[in-house]
Image (cartoon, rainbow, N blue to C red):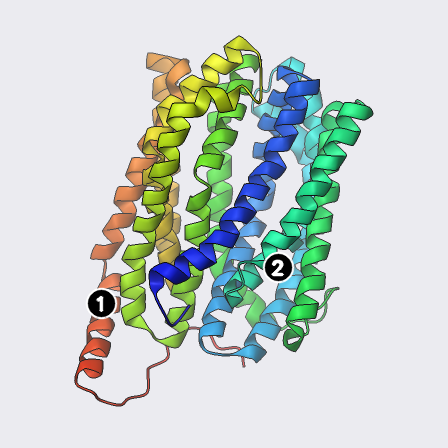
Amino acid sequence: MTKGSITKLTFLFALPICLGNILQQLYNTVDTLVIGKYCGATSIAAVGTSAQPVEILLCIFLGISGGVSILVSQATGRNDNKGIEKLAKAAVSFVYTTAIVITFLGVFLGPQILKLMQVPDDTIDLAVIYIRIVLLGTLGQLGYNTNAGILRGLGDSTSSVIFLVFSCFINIALDLLFVAVFHLNVFGVALATMIATYFSWIFSIVYIRKHYPQYHFPVLPKKCDMKILKKIIAIGLPLGLNSSLYSFGHTVVQTLVNTQGSTFIAACVVASKLSGISSIAVSSFSSAALTFTGQNLGAGNYRRIKRGGVQIPLLSGAFALTGDILMFIFCRQFISFFTKDPQVLTDAVHYIHVVIPFSWCFAVFNGILNVVNGLGHVKYTTIVNSLMLWAVRIPSAIIITKFINGYYLMASIPISFAFGMLSMLLFYKTKYWKDIKEKSSKENDEVISGISYEKPVAKVPSFS
């Protein structure tokens, strides 16, 4: 992504990820569809509410895969193949080590977290079953996400779609088999998800070893360079802690949702699935922003960083706005695929109408955030994300619930979106962005004057 039209490259990079995100969303949505058809609102609530503890336990370490992606993209910009090989070895060792820890922690701590979340009595037993089974798939989850991060850093955004196609169809087939045929309810859905996750991880390993043999990608953990592992953690840990704090904050908000009863929980679960579908382009453009910035930083292309740092967030916001309008108009028809319960349907439509009109703000916010992450300034994004959740969304949700009406507590989401976007726009006023602009101007002047020069390589970690 260091040469050519920024807009064209962004679309070409984001499109496969967008398709992958649709499959990923389908991966999760099928669970809700199958349960809604064969089990009912209580089971939907169990799956939805147990997703938060799973995220809390996984997010710290999934953030490490983001750190790997950033470092790989920078190494790709420098053509540092040896460094990429070392990064891959360190990442694989980290995945195996942490997966074991998370699995054991999740099995024992998951139920305790659900109790703290005040999950209703008619839902908690099913939620405990779901969380324990899904967390047995931690190794597959961490392994797949790390491998996908490596591939995105290399500029390969297509391959992960291949893995998800296979795993998604496996998940759908097993969902129908376990729930519709064997009537295993939530246990069946969790088991299907766990098995499909392992398949996606295995597919990714086979693909990387076949198509990128020069990196000698290991299947099992091997001795890794501790200096490189520390650099991965230095960038990935803030991203992971940020995501984990965000998920923990969602759990606090989910606790407020849980006080409204199982029907309202089910409505929020269904509505959140739809809002996720409508903003699929957001994460696609965000991945493009991360890889684009990292590769061009490694190559010292500051003019492209300056242009792409504005263009990509705007493209993301425009696409999100288009999806938001369609979802706002047709949300009732979409929701009817998930449930026929009239109250759940009404509450879910209400949720969409409150949240969706401001989702484009989140698209712009997330686009800028990943430009900044690609530059390596993860502390800035961590601070903004923390404020967005803990200083805005949670307090506003509590105030709405306590002093206005809990039925409108989802209004805290668009409030936090607007705050996040404005906060990230301020990055363009910081010394970090001014430095990018100055280097861009210098680069531009040298090109205009016809001076032949060797591009300065950005000061990013070298592993050779």
The numbered dot on residue 355 is none
In what element is the residue under mark 2? helix
**Residue 326 at x, y percent in the picture:** 39, 31
- Residues packed near mark 1 inside 10 Å, few (<14), some (14 to 19) or many (20 plus): some
In what element is the residue under mark 1? helix
Q: Quadrant of the N terminus?
A: bottom left
- Residue 73 appears in the picture as rendered: yes
**Which of the 4 image quadrants contains residue 134?**
top right
- Residues packed near mark 2 inside 10 Å, few (<14), some (14 to 19) or many (20 plus): many
Residue drawn 34% across the image and 63% down it:
6
- Residue farthest to the right, as pictured: 182
- Front-lying residue, 45 or 28: 28
Amino acid at dot 1: Lys
Sequence order check, earlier mark of 2 and 1: 2
**Residue 71 at x, y percent in the picture:** 49, 67
Q: Is residue 224 above or below residue 100?
A: below
Residue drawn 52% across the image and 53% down it:
16
**Which of the 4 image quadrants contains residue 87?**
bottom right
Amino acid at dot 2: Asn
Q: Is residue 244 above or below residue 402?
A: below
- Residue 240 appears in the picture as rendered: no
Residue drawn 35% across the image and 37% down it:
322
Instruction: From the viewer's perspective, tell me whether residue 393 is left or right of residue 36.
Output: left
Q: Is residue 433 above or below residue 266?
A: below
Q: Which residue bears the numbered disc 2? A: 147
Q: Which residue bears the numbered disc 1? A: 437
- Residue farthest to the bottom, as pictured: 452
Is label 2 in contact with label 1 (beta carbons under 8 Å)? no
Residue drawn 43% across the image and 45% down it:
281
Instruction: From the viewer's perspective, tell me whether residue 452 is left or right of residue 3.
Output: left
- Front-lying residue, 138 or 22: 22
**Residue 177 at x, y percent in the picture:** 79, 30
